[in-house]
Amino acid sequence: MQATLRQGGAGFKDVVRVTIYVRDYRPEMLPALRRVRDKYIAGGTPAPASALIGVAALFHPDVLVEADAVAVVPPTVQAR
């Protein structure tokens, strides 16, 4: 995700929303998931909106967690 944000001229500080999909989610997983999320995106002010969605399966059987994010970056070239 960090590489994709960089390609768009953004970083985790520019993330305004994140959605995390967790295969076979159980409530006891929440503290660990929050620690990982906060390591990357909770440092911003304000913190981005976030959602956690438990799912039965993801795109590959070995994948346990998938995330997507929306970042807002101001334009770098002034409109003419």
Image: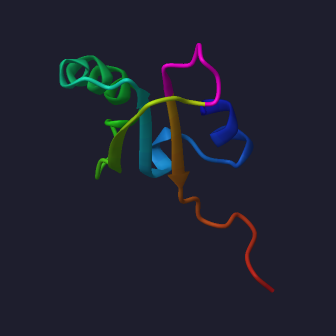
Q: Of 22 and 43, which appears nearest the observer?
A: 22
Where is residue 57? Give x, y as percent: 51, 29
| Rendered image quadrant of residue 34 | top left
Where is residue 26? Give x, y as percent: 25, 23
Say whether residue 43 is magenta. Answer: no
Left or right: residue 63 compared with residue 48 = right
Residue sitting farthest toward the front: 56
The residue drawn where x is 36% and y is 40% is 53
The residue drawn where x is 34% and y is 46% is 51
The residue drawn where x is 68% and y is 31% is 3
Q: Which residues are magenta?
A: 59-65
Q: Give the position of the C terminus as an image quadrant.
A: bottom right
| Rendered image quadrant of residue 11 | top right
Where is residue 58? Give x, y as percent: 56, 30
Q: Of 63 and 13, which appears nearest the observer?
A: 63
Q: Main secondary structure of the magenta part?
A: loop
Residue sitting farthest toward the right: 80
Where is residue 16? Give x, y as percent: 43, 54
Type of colouring: rainbow
Residue sitting farthest toward the bottom: 80
| Rendered image quadrant of residue 42 | top left
Say whether residue 63 is magenta. Answer: yes
